[in-house]
Image (spheres, rainbow, N blue to C red):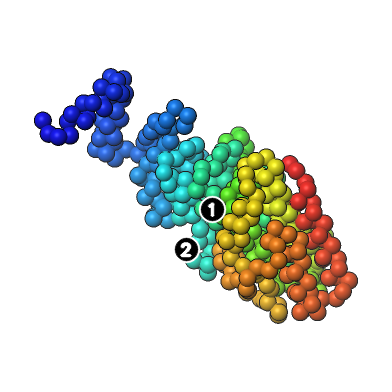
Amino acid sequence: MNDGEPARHTAAAKDGPWLTRRRLLVAALALALLATGTAVPLVLAAGDDEPPCQEIPAATRALAARPAAATRALDPGDDLSRMDEVRRTLRHDNPCGDGGKVLGEVVEAATLASGPGTPHTLAQARAVYGVVAALDGADIPEGMAPGVARMLADYVVDEARYLSHDPDLGAPAVPGEAAAPDAQGWTRYGRFLAPGEAHTEFEYEHPYGEAEADPKWLVGELTQDPEAFAVLYDAERAYFAHYLERLTRHGTDPGFRPDRPARSGYDSTGTTWPDNDLEDIAERVGDLMKHRAGHAWEGTVADLAAYDEAVRRHTRGAYRPAARQVMTRPPMAAIAARPVSGPLRGDPMDGRYQLFTVFDAWARERGVPPERAAAMRQIIDDAYVRGLWLRF
């Protein structure tokens, strides 16, 4: 008998035979899983007042360093036949230790472009749908929110299009060819798109109700975390600057062709879709501020001052449009990765001020006609206030 044995015997006698047998069973199960390589999460008991936590399987952890494998794991397929597998991979109510952070890293590995200049693939775009659908109605584990927020930021143009589910859509993502503009320069997937980039169809609704992906709901959950809030806020402000600098000095879409028949069947002008897009961006900034206030009201954010300070620490800075019209059409990942123009001035949580500071400078530098600038400004203001106050 060595020096360690009496201590083990004492602990066993103190714990009682049931707990001793349970420990032996857990040890035996762990050895069996190691021998077979089976990726089954273990649930570890906590104290009387704490729920048990779930160990993230080693096979899942490994996906964080293997982007191609992560994409395959979270791709639900065109028919969503793999949604159950995606849910099993991502949904853990109470991961042990750094498990939540690891799950966020797996999401990033599966969905983020390999670089700012690289378009998203169709499989990555489908995986984004799979992630949002898998997390529908779930509590986001601690540490996971920033990774999921970075995913949405990487697809900010696609997230911006979401209004409601559409049973007429045929798949959770489409290839770049499907997003090509019509003869009038219009496409439902947005303006200034990178050629050949796949797009996530958040509005796709499975005909048998197997899954729905609602990024608006997910943003509300993610913003309980100040770092996730900062990531999403940066992405919206970067997209605002990106969008403005590509408009003409009259605030119109340079790709609009009024002399050609529209494939879409919609009657529009050069200002129709810019007005719609700017409205959507401003409304989502208002949404972020609404969620912040809501979390404080509900108590999910206990110390609003500490939350705001954390947001400020994680915010990258300010984004200003170029002084001249920009003609490039970079992939979506380049928007979130856009270099900052300098530090953020003023109160970060005054979203209206932040939007107007950028817009007014753009209108002044580009010489936008006063009537058009005033109309655009009013659209932005109305949409921001609607996002701030409208509750779902």
Residue at image coords 26%, 30%: 28
CA distance for labels 2 and 1 = 18 Å
Amino acid type, residue under disc 1 in the picture: Pro
Quadrant of the image containing the N terminus: top left
Residue 348 % position (x, y): 68, 61
Quadrant of the image containing the C terminus: top right
Residue pointed to by mark 2: 114
Residue pointed to by mark 1: 146
- Residues packed near mark 1 inside 10 Å, few (<14), some (14 to 19) or many (20 plus): many
Relative side of 307 to 38, left or right: right
Regarding residue 201, the answer to whether it shows in the image is no
**Could you say which quadrant of the image residue 8 lies in?**
top left
Q: How many numbered marks, from 0 up?
A: 2
Residue 346, placed above or below residue 284? below
Residue at image coords 51%, 42%: 141
Regarding residue 361, the answer to whether it shows in the image is yes
Residue 242, placed above or below residue 206? below
Residue 343 % position (x, y): 63, 70
User: Furthest-left residue in view?
Assistant: 1
- Residues packed near mark 2 inside 10 Å, few (<14), some (14 to 19) or many (20 plus): some
Residue at image coords 12%, 34%: 2
Residue 263, placed above or below residue 168? below
Residue 352 % position (x, y): 76, 61
Amino acid type, residue under disc 2 in the picture: Ser
Decide which of 220, 65 is in the foreground and name it.
220
